[in-house]
Amino acid sequence: MTNRVVIFGATGTVGVYTALRLKELNYDVIAVGRRKSDNGFFADYNIPYYSVDISKKEEFDKLPVEEVECVIHYAGAMPARMRGYNPQEYIDSIITGTLNVLDYTHKVNGKKIVFTQSISDCFWMVKDATPIPADIWRKFPLNNDHSVYVIAKNAAVDLIEHYFHKYGIKRFILRLPTIYLYHPDPYYHVNGEKREMWYRLFIDKAIAGEPIEIWGDASKVKEIVYVKDFVQIVECCVKSPLDGGFYNVGEEECVSLDEQIKGTIAVFSQKGKESPIIYRPEMPNPSEFVFDISKTKNELGYKPQWTYREALKDMKHEMEINPFEKLWGKESDYRN
């Protein structure tokens, strides 16, 4: 049996970690990204790299057509990476792109596809610490900058379901919260405008020993998943003999806002120069949500390995060594 895995979106944050982990496990990994060049990064790991715009069907002719066992699909436009607002990018890269990826998977007789879905598809359930089940009605408000994105992602899931029922391509849909990792670019976009990611802002303040404010109810919890636990779930999907379905990505325990800040200070502040915490309970509460990961554990055999603080320590180590500099560059390339 072949063990070839084709990863679309391989140059992105979760794509790189997935590619290197599966290669470490002796899978025959093919890396695919929209970037014209990966600067020779993947060649260093004996992984072929192909530049493909998934919105263009003809570009798939570049890819291998034999012995593909599994396709992992991370590619597509994201609100966090979109400057301004161009909803057509979501239609082209997510809906048309996913249809093209599915056609490619069918053409090469691929047995399964792994696809990442956003928590945005169940945002109507994000209100308290009641665990959100994996198999939940997918809907989202139709009046904000994420609306077309979620419409496109839901349409992509429907296409994947169609290819499962018509062609038998097994499908593993992974619903993601924020995935914690170190990337030299600390920014994302909200309503098309550039902002520093909240957890990177806290890390910056902790490194500088500056005061950190905690707004609202500090006991509010949320899912904080380290990238290496996420990759473990993907590994479980690749190995699974099941037909798949929807699976939540989460950790064993959610993390309170209080622990988020205290952990960040403990790991990143200099000893004796720890950031003081200023509690602001009169300010708005943070969002709170918990995923029910029982299905992910029971069906896929997922066993979370990273605690929040151990993940922070590993992030700090990767911040110091910047293992993907050849691909992603340095922080100075992004900082204003």
Image (cartoon, rainbow, N blue to C red):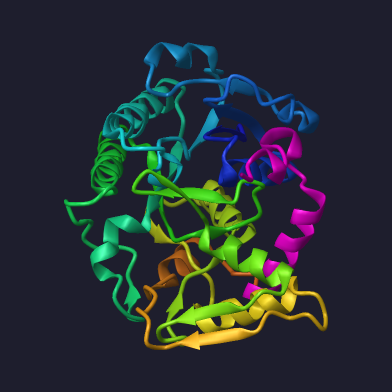
- In the rendered image, residue 324 lying in the magenta stretch gets the answer yes
Nearer to me, 162 or 284 = 284
Quadrant position of the C terminus in the picture: top right
> Furthest-left residue in view?
142
Taking the image as drawn, is residue 103 in sight? Answer: yes
Rendered position, 297 above or below 336 = below
Q: Quadrant of residue 176?
A: bottom left
Left or right, 277 with respect to 317, comes to left
Q: Position of residue 297 (x, y in %)?
A: 49, 68
The residue positioned 80% from the left and 55% from the top of the image is 320
The residue positioned 47% from the left and 40% from the top of the image is 74
**In the rendered picture of this protein, how many numbered marks are placed on residues?**
0
- In the rendered image, residue 170 lying in the magenta stretch gets the answer no
Left or right, 200 with respect to 129, comes to right
Rendered position, 304 above or below 191 = below
Nearer to me, 34 or 174 = 34
Q: Which residues are magenta?
A: 308-336
Left or right, 155 with respect to 172, comes to left
Nearer to me, 216 or 234 = 216
Q: Quadrant of residue 278?
A: bottom right
Nearer to me, 21 or 254 = 254
Q: Position of residue 306 (x, y in %)?
A: 65, 70
Rendered position, 97 above or below 307 = above
Quadrant position of the N terminus in the picture: top right
Q: Main secondary structure of the magenta part?
A: helix
Q: Position of residue 326 (x, y in %)?
A: 75, 34
The residue positioned 29% from the left and 49% from the top of the image is 146
Rendered position, 199 above or below 36 = below
Taking the image as drawn, is residue 244 in sight? Answer: no
